[in-house]
Image (tube, grey):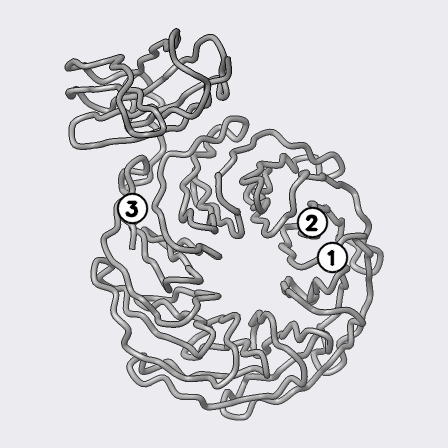
Amino acid sequence: VINVSNPYLPSEVGFYDTGGEACGVFVSGSYAYVADRDGLRVIDVSDPEHPSEVGFYNTGGYAFGVFVSSSYAYVADGDGLRVIDVSDPYHPSEVGFYDTGDWAEDVFVSGSYAYVADGRAGLRVIDVSNPYLPSEVGFYSTGGFAFGVFVSSSYAYVADGAIRVIDVSDPEHPSEVGFYNTEGVASGVFVSDSYAYVADGAIRVIDVSDPEHPSEVGFYDTGGDVEDVFVSGSYAYVADDGAGLRVIDVSDPEHPSEVGFYDTEGVALGVFVSGSYAYVADSWGAGLRVIDVSDPEHPSEVGFYETGGAEGVFVSGSYAYLADGGDGLYILDVSHFTDVDENDVQKPRAFSLTVYPNPFNASMSIKYNLSSATDVSLDIYDILGHRVTTLVSEHQPAGSYTVQWAPEDLSSGLYFVRMKAGKQTITKKAMYLK
């Protein structure tokens, strides 16, 4: 659980090791429901500083995804759909199960139906009006491998290597009304208004205003390998694997264009946008990165919390729930992420450090912001941890500052710019090339 009330200085306030491999998370009320490979774990997060497991159910399969509706948790469990009664979170109990036949990858619940992306089998429509007796009422073999599903209005959009539009207005007789071959391997989909945004290695914008004739109206090759996409307003925020976070302007869906980019350093696998911030699950020894996207053209990292292997993130209210494959569920307090008051632009509200250009050869600029008056030290260290110079060592008022560094007798290589402001410290890497 990471407190991000000061987005520039996230700090852990709580943690719970789920013991398995947290693959998915859904937050409802005071509880976080975690698909933890070996089963469903119910974590009480009413006190984010002391998350505690109050219930567990061994699904017996391989829990990948979870969706909570009313008093039930619907778990995509590899071998099928399991319906878990969580009305008493302390004693979750399986009340229904349906063997989907293949490999349940994802689930989306709408009304009385659970729509399951079932691997090679395709889309299965399960009637869960009686959770004790879930029954398949409809099925459609998509012909590919169903990875993801998103339901909007009367249609289910299935990512199965391509995008298939399934009419589910009559759940007992789902029928494919539209198809679009994305050329890549479509593994995720997000629907907003009349467009489906598809992750298939790149970002494809599919016009689904006429579901029977979906057509690609926009395409953007990020140059990486798109893992996840979240659409908010006029922008699509893309978790682009090793490339980081990309901000795509989709105000004109026919001509999506990249307007901003931030290299997260790790492997960006998931993204969730709330307010002016993009929360990125940045795997491979990285963690949760908080990116300020109030100016989409210049996204900047304002907070970071290191975890073992972040895979997915969901933000609800004041907390970010991070599914970490190696550690479990992290709950991060993000209550203090606030936008800058337009009447207070001369006084930075947070503590930050930026170095540019990077790499550099002759000199580099070091820019930093102070939210309040404090003692400041700005030092340069070599790769062995030796301090090579001190650029600032004084008390400074709140404001923005820029310092130049022009190394003369130093060799090329990696250096570290370390700033300490009061009790807060931040470090940036800088590559010097002669």
User: Is residue 78 depicted above or below 14 in this figure?
Assistant: below
Give the left or right position of residue 269, taking residue 207 as reference.
Answer: left
| Tag 3: amino acid | Ser
Local crowd size for mark 1, using a 10 Å CA cut-off: few (<14), some (14–19), many (≥20) = many
Relative image position of residue 316 (x, y in whole percent) = 38, 55
Q: Secondary structure at mark 3?
A: loop
Label ID, residue 335:
3
Q: CA distance from mark 3 to mark 1?
A: 37 Å
Q: Quadrant of residue 369?
A: top left
Question: Which of the pair 344/104 is nearer the observer?
Answer: 104
| Tag 2: amino acid | Gly
Whichever of callouts 2 and 3 sits on the residue coming sooner in the sequence is 2
Judging by the rendered image, the residue that carries numbered circle 2 is: 201
Residue contact at pointers 2 and 1, CB within 8 angstroms: yes
Judging by the rendered image, the residue that carries numbered circle 1 is: 185
Residue located farthest toward the bottom when viewing the structure as drawn? 133
Residue drawn at 57 percent across, 69 percent down: 108
Relative image position of residue 179 (x, y in whole percent) = 82, 61
